[in-house]
Amino acid sequence: MPGQRIGYIRVSSLDPNPQPQLMGIQLDRIFTDKASGKDVKRPQLEELLSFARGGDTIVVHSMDRLARNLVDLRALVERLTIRGVRVEFVNEGLTFTNEDSPMANLMLSVMDSFADFERALNRERQREGITLAKARGVYRGRSKALTPDEAAELRQIAAAGEPKAGLAHKYGISRETVYQYLRTDAEPGQDNIARATDLQD
């Protein structure tokens, strides 16, 4: 039994008309998200990923409609094709499958290269921005994860014996950040002792 042809459409709030994207294409079902390209929360995409089965074909107008960036695109394509789902991009005229296609493998390799390029550019822009901000005297580093009251509360709970992993979960921060807050009140060398005794947390 042939699989279903499933459309995925993403439109932004500034351009809320989804019709032109897959107009004239015969589809069994369509999933539509209204979200910006940078939006992580796309409930219809998540539903589509759960709905699609091996033998199905997902049809998308263009690559930028499916993914937030090249890394996201590569991960989504692999996640689908490894399950036997075909992915078609109408605008680019590309189809990805789990078959050993030289063209598909080449395109995925190119996507990886551009993803590395994109990450390198972002890191360079970030460094340049920080350098310029420091030169203007306006760079303050990252904002504090906790308010002073929350930091004081964290130290009190830690002193009472709460595991650092539990503190990290409670305040929504990493264990390293927990240690950084505790380090501000610790004598030199005490933080290393705390780390050593905290291995069972």
Image (cartoon, rainbow, N blue to C red):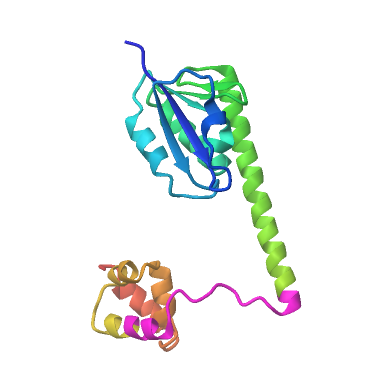
Up the image or down, 190 lies above or below 33; here it is below
Q: Is residue 82 rendered to the left or right of residue 16?
A: left
Residue in the image at 36% along x and 12% along y: 2
Magenta segment: 134-154
Residue 8 on the magenta span? no
- The residue depicted at 41 percent of the width and 88 percent of the height is 185
Looking at the rendering, in which quadrant would you find the N terminus? top left
Q: Position of residue 32 (x, y in %)?
A: 44, 36
Report x, y in % for residue 107.
60, 27
| Picture layout, residue 198 above or below residue 7 | below
Q: Compared with residue 161, is residue 78 higher up or lower down, i.e. above or below?
A: above
Query: Quadrant location of the C terminus?
Result: bottom left
Up-down relation of residue 27 to residue 31 (above or below): above
Q: Quadrant of residue 133?
A: bottom right
Residue depicted at x 72% and y 69% = 131
Q: Residue at x 61, y 26 (%)?
A: 91
The answer to which image quadrant residue 156 occupies is bottom left
Horizontal side of 104 relative to 161 (left or right) equals right
